[in-house]
Amino acid sequence: MFKFNLEVLHKVRKLKKDKIIKTWTAEVEMLNHLVREKNNLVESHNDYKKKYVSSLNEGNQARTLILKNYIDTFKERFRQSQVKIDEQQQKMSHLREQVLSVSRDFEIIEKLKEKKYQAYLQEKEKREIKQNEELIVLRSKRGNKIGSI
């Protein structure tokens, strides 16, 4: 039976890889959420700009003032949204390096395990061939003895 002498290291690296990929997935979801949030802000801003223009045409000064204040605050909300996206992208850039490093480490041990397993299979095959050859020799010796009596 095949036993990999670095199995514990293999399992640890696999767990690290799985954990970092899970973290990566969560961070991608967070980035997607932030981008959707920003897009919703842009759509909302565009709607309010249309309402603002309509309000100007109607001559409703109170409504126009309220809409203008919202549009002005939108710029700050949009900036904050972009800052969050930039921060998330920077976080993901650092995390990407970790994912690559952990994945490389796991691949190294995985390839080593595969090489050791292939060597084990070859050795096993050699042993089986040798055993079969010994059985053939023993049977042929017994057959010669039986035939000579």
Image: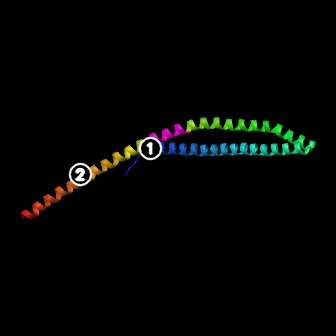
Q: Residues within 10 Å of mark 1 (few under 14, many from 20)?
A: some
Local SS, label 1: helix
Residue 109 placement, left or right of 17: left
Q: Residue at x 49, y 38 (%)?
A: 104
Q: Which label's residue is closer to the chain start, 2 or 1?
A: 1
Q: Give coordinates of residue 10: x percent, y percent.
A: 47, 44
Left or right, 149 with reference to 3: left
* Amino acid at pointer 1: Glu
Would you name the residue on which mark 1 appears?
A: 110
Identify whether 27 is placed above or below 137. above
* Magenta segment boundaries in residue numbering: 99-108
Q: Quadrant of residue 74?
A: top right
Say above or below: 108 vs 2: above
Question: Is 32 or 73 nearer to us in this picture?
Answer: 73
Which residue lies at the image location 66% right of the left edge and 45% below the top edge? 32
Q: Is residue 146 visible?
A: yes
Q: Horizontal and vertical percent for residue 106?
A: 48, 41
**Residue at x-position 38% and y-position 43%:** 115
Q: Say whether residue 106 is magenta.
A: yes
